[in-house]
Amino acid sequence: MTELLLVALLGALLYALPATAHPLILALGIATGMPHGATDILTERGSISRPALGYYAASIVLLGALWFWAPSWALGVFLALSMLHFGSEDAATESGTALFLHETLVRGMLVVLAPSMFHEAEVLRLFGLLAETSWAGPEWTHGLSLARSLWIFLAFTLFAHYAVRSTQWRHVVFVFVQILVLVAVFRLLEPLTAFVAYFVGGHSLHSARKIWPVLKEHRVKVLGATAFTFLVAAAVFGSAAGTSLDDRLVRTAFVSLSLFAVPHGIWRTVEVLRERWARG
């Protein structure tokens, strides 16, 4: 319930803010990502895990090279892994395997597809900026139409799936209220701003609840890293205060975030699926 209310409140707040506040909004999103990803490289004793650090370093180098040599492929990898990561983290892990996978697809596809469904021109411009080539054309139109139809089908059948699998109707209603709130947020806000509202109020908070014991145990290190990240991000994006985000700043911020987000997404998705399979 907390995540639902926070996403709704953040969505309303960001909707009321002027475009000049967007740089600091983006800085907030960057800083919020630090706590829920900090435990990837921390051991149980709070020291830095060398294997995890090596994994991140190698992943960052490989993804950086992909962004440099084949940005369209890098963007595709980012979108596909984002769908799996957000969906698997937000889905109810106590559900049966089939229901868990079903909800993973619905939630993940919503976060990735909603901006394109409601703000197609802005998303195409962003994707063109990131991929350094236009994605507009018949293939995009046809693919988006198929993906939208698939998501609608999966969303309706998820309700039926929950209805036959769950006896707690309050939980069923709550899941779909969450989805409707996210649909409203992505419909009303610009793509990047809507994503920050979801990421800060929904995904990060939900993930932090799962790893709260570790965050609490090593809170000084996590809060220190978070404060440092926010200060650096605020300094960079604060230089753009008074104007909307320009193309160079948006691309730099997006690519930089992806260098950490993609390795984290793979790490967490593997952990979630491993825990899910272990329970049967």
Image: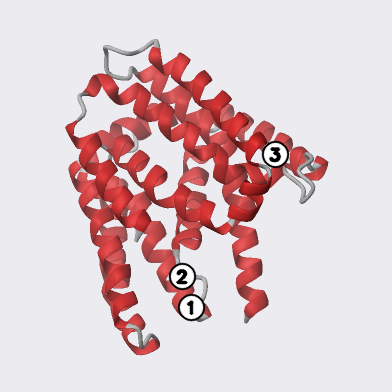
Q: Position of residue 118 (x, y in %)?
A: 20, 46
Q: Which residue is mark 3?
A: 56
- Discs 3, 1 touching: Cβ within 8 Å: no
Residue 247, placed above or below residue 264: above
Disc 1 secondary structure class: loop
Does residue 118 appear left or right of residue 79 in this picture? left
Does residue 152 appear left or right of residue 279 in this picture? left
Of the residues shown, which amino acid type is indicated by label 2? Ala
Residue at point 59%, 44% (across, down): 37
Residue 97, placed above or below residue 35: below
Quarter of the figure that contains the C terminus: bottom right
Does residue 11 appear left or right of residue 246 in this picture? left
| Mark toward the start of the polypeptide (3 vs 2) | 3
Q: Which residue is mark 1?
A: 95
- Discs 1, 2 touching: Cβ within 8 Å: yes
Of the residues shown, which amino acid type is indicated by label 1? Ser
Of the residues shown, which amino acid type is indicated by label 3? Tyr
Badge nearest the viewer, 3 or 2 = 2
Decide: few, some or many residues near mark 3? Use Cα within 10 Å; few <14, some 14-19, many ≥20. Answer: many
Q: Quarter of the image holding residue 167?
A: bottom left
Disc 3 secondary structure class: helix
Disc 2 secondary structure class: loop
Q: Position of residue 132 (x, y in %)?
A: 42, 27
The one nearer the camera, 252 or 132, is 252
Quarter of the figure that contains the N terminus: bottom left
What whole-number distance in Å separates the C-alpha atoms at marks 3 and 2?
27 Å
- Discs 3, 2 touching: Cβ within 8 Å: no
Labelled disc at residue 92: 2
Decide: few, some or many residues near mark 2? Use Cα within 10 Å; few <14, some 14-19, many ≥20. Answer: some
Residue at point 61%, 51% (across, down): 266
Q: Position of residue 9 (x, y in %)?
A: 26, 45
Q: Is residue 100 visible?
A: yes
